[in-house]
């Protein structure tokens, strides 16, 4: 039997990409920050990246981990997930060593440059919130964001933040429901795989921390059509390839584009079907092959991040339910506020799926608290 093709995966958390790669017939060689039980189980080989989320992707550590993984089996290339949004120079270094299945450094840098992004929106006739690199004269009604930030933890109200460094920018706060379009593109054409609605898991210091997502998003047809049209305008201008997502705000007055995430992201789990591997679709799209249509789903799906409510020096051994993922090993340490695990919910409606995922998140926190008592 022919050996499966090996592909490197580098991401803050590589589990979803690794599981989808396995489903698609690939041998995933994974480098990530967590080394969770199910990540290691899905990976053909795994290396845990040094330093962790607090310091982000560091060039020497990432390249050393990938070189180590590549000795296990010669990879066909690499897929970079979350964690590289503010590291285009690292993407460039990786692409000089291995074939990159995804957007190159120049595409990522342009997508995550606030002024370049705003100009793209203007050129394509797409509404977007006002942006500023300078502190607004009246900061009320503005948000401050870190350039290349992901996950919402970096977003603050401008009036409550001290953010004058070059790594920050300001965006006018606008009303609307956050909706993300998962798109698959070959650089010229795009297939919108579906829409998801997001919610936050706020803390006093992180009011916009990502909480979870559910698909399908409850959308009027006109809003969905407007987002599809916006994506179709942007894709050839930006030369996006593979899996990407576009984050919008949607209300009765229309849509506004918040940002483009030029990589596979947080909603992979809820859009992974039993018939199709999103990882395999990503690779195919990078080679110029798009599916005739998006996958269909019989039920709504939701995923929620469970965050640790306190520091845990040695995580207890748990009998993890089947509806969990990203499960830390017994004995591993988890810092307060770090992701503890992911939970899922499937139901007949999006509201029911979201409610189920949130109930299950509460159950995990209760179980963890009881185990540590």
Image (cartoon, helix red, strand yellow):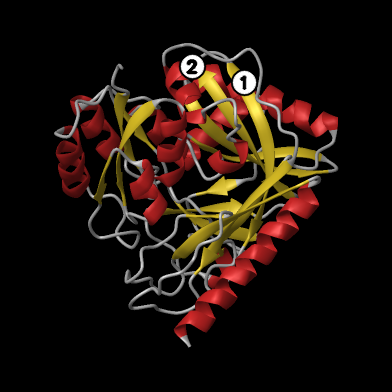
Give x and y (percent) for residue 215.
70, 42
Query: Which residue is at 40% across, 62% downward?
Result: 328
Residue in front for this viewpoint, 233 or 121: 233
- Residue furthest to the front: 1
Q: Nearer the viewer, residue 143 or 289?
A: 289
Left or right: 302 in relation to 219: left
The image quarter containing residue 43 is top left
Q: Is 331 positioned to the left or the right of 164 in the image?
A: left
Name the element at disc 2: loop
1 w.r.t. 218: above or below: above
Q: From mark 2 to mark 1, how far is it between C-alphas? A: 11 Å
Q: Who's the residue at 85% across and 43% down the image? A: 252
Residue located at (29% from left, 27% from top):
6
Q: Residue at x 54, y 64 (%)?
A: 306
Pointer 2 and pointer 1: residues touching (CB < 8 Å)? Answer: no
For marks 2 and 1, give the one nearer the viewer: 1
Reading the image, the residue beneath label 1 is 191
- Residue bearing mark 2: 187
Q: Where's residue 254, x and y in %? A: 79, 38
């Amino acid at each position: 039997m022919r050996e499966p093709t090996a592909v490197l995966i580098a991401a803050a958390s590589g589990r979803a990409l690794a599981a989808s790669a396995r489903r698609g017939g690939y041998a995933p060689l994974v480098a990530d920050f967590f080394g969770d039980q199910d990540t290691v189980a899905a990976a053909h080989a795994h290396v845990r990246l040094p330093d962790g989320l607090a310091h982000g992707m560091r060039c020497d550590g990432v390249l050393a981990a990938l070189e180590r993984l590549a000795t296990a089996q010669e990879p066909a290339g690499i897929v970079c997930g979350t964690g590289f949004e503010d590291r285009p120079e690292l993407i460039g270094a990786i692409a000089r060593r291995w074939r990159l299945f995804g957007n190159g450094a120049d595409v990522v840098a342009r997508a995550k440059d606030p002024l370049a992004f705003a100009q793209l929106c203007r050129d394509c006739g797409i509404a977007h919130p006002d942006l500023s690199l300078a502190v607004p004269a009246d900061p009320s009604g503005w948000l401050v964001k870190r350039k290349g930030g992901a996950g919402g933890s970096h977003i603050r109200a401008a009036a409550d933040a001290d953010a004058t460094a070059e790594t920050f920018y300001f965006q006018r706060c606008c009303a609307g429901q956050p909706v993300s379009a998962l798109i698959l593109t070959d650089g010229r054409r795009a297939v919108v795989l579906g829409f998801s609605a997001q919610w936050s898991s706020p803390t006093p210091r992180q009011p916009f921390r990502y909480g979870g997502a559910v698909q399908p998003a409850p959308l009027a047809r006109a809003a969905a059509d407007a987002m599809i049209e916006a994506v179709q305008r942007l894709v050839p201008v930006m030369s996006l390839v593979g899996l990407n997502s576009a984050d919008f705000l949607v209300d009765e007055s229309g849509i506004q584009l918040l940002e483009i995430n030029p990589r596979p992201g947080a909603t992979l789990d809820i859009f992974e079907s039993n018939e199709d591997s999103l990882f395999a679709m990503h690779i195919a799209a990078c080679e110029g092959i798009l599916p005739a249509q998006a996958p269909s789903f019989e039920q709504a799906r939701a995923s929620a991040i469970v965050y640790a409510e306190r520091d845990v020096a040695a995580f207890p051994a748990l009998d993890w339910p089947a509806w969990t993922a990203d499960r830390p090993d017994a004995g591993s340490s988890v810092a307060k506020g770090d992701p503890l695990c992911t939970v899922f919910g499937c139901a007949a409606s999006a509201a029911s799926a979201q409610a189920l995922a949130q109930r299950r998140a509460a159950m995990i926190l209760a179980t963890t608290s009881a185990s540590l008592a």
